[in-house]
Amino acid sequence: MKQFTSVRDMHDVNKFVQEALALKQNPLVHSQLGKNKTLGLIFLNPSLRTRMSAQKAAYNLGMNVITVSMDKEGWSIEFEEGAVMNAGKTEHIKEAAAVIGQYCDIAGIRCFPGLTDRHFDYGEVVLNQFIRYCNVPVVSLESATLHPLQSFADLITITENWNKPLKPKVVLTWAPHIKALPQAVANSFSEWMTAAEVEFIITHPEGYELDEIYTEGDTVTYDQENALLNADFVYVKNWSSYRDYGKILPVEKNWMLTNGKLGITNNAKVMHCLPVRRNVELPDEIMDGENTLILKQAENRIYAAQAVLKKMLAEI
Ligand code: CP
């Protein structure tokens, strides 16, 4: 595996989930595989879970880790080809990525969208330039459009919490937020659920349609109540508008999930990628209730990252 940026980089999703679950049972079984190998983790944006889970996964495999919070510690990076760098940017991605590749055997990068230029963000300019110039296998730690390690952990969590022969009904529901957030988690979850053995429905207010490339064939409805009916898993996430790019649009009713709304589900488990704004996106009664899988998702981030790193290490 030369890159992990999307579910499309996985040949057999179910096999990978089983591999991650096996690693969870015995995390140190491959503790020699990464000996003398270095993982570089480059963050252009903040992170708690992705940073710590990737480090933990690498340590479980015996790797060394170098983490750089580029937004605070590194030089400002220019991405434009042929740029005359006579303004604020200090270093070009061509040199920065190439140097990182010299120090590391595998590199990860987190690069959020700016949410102002859809063409730039959805072209994944930052991620693609990094992959192009760093010359080692690259793991996306969340890009402008996708968050594959999160979605992989989410599918692991659904799999280990479902033991019936029928496909579970999984609902992705939009939630309110005070800030404009990327569509990456929602895009990615949709992409992974489409590849998984589940019945998948997306519900959101009008104007919050995701890029159809990630939702092709999925059921999408503005009727949250109808979507929640008999759901087994409800994934809660805010995202800003893709159509009116990066904007927060006015929404009439309250889209926050409550225990009352959960009453029409099949006693659904509730999921969220974190960080969550309590009592804005999700109420305390759900966050502290019995139906939440949210901390289990965060725990499974370790084994998602470990399964990906293990596959990359085996092929170096
Ligand atoms: N879910 C997630 O990616 O968390 P962080 O932003 O803290 O890494």
Image (cartoon, helix red, strand yellow):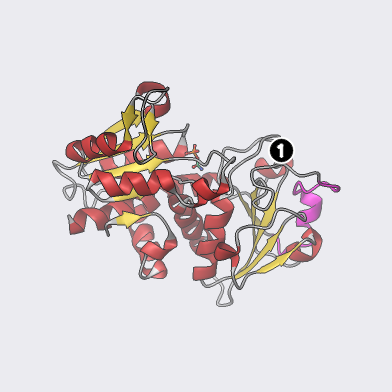
Residue extending farthest to the right is: 252
Relative to 275, is 6 on the left or the right?
left
> Callout 1 environment at 10 Å: few (<14), some (14 to 19), or many (20+)?
few
Relative to 311, say whether 229 is above or below: below
- x and y, in percent, of residue 124 in the image: 45, 49
Q: Which residue is mark 1?
A: 284
Secondary element under disc 1, as helix, strand or loop, is helix
Residue 140 visible within the image: no
Relative to 227, is 58 on the left or the right?
left
**263 part of magenta stretch:** yes
**Could you tell me which residue is drawn at 57 percent across and 37 percent down?**
275
Magenta residues span: 251-267
- x and y, in percent, of residue 99 in the image: 21, 35
Front position in the image: 290 or 234: 234
**Could you tell me which residue is drawn at 42 percent across and 23 percent down?**
87
- x and y, in percent, of residue 24 in the image: 36, 53
Amino acid marked by disc 1 = Asp
Front position in the image: 86 or 148: 86
Relative to 54, is 30 on the left or the right?
left
**Could you tell me which residue is drawn at 52 percent across and 42 percent down?**
113
Front position in the image: 145 or 298: 145
Q: Quadrant of residue 233?
A: bottom right
Q: Quadrant of residue 109?
A: top left
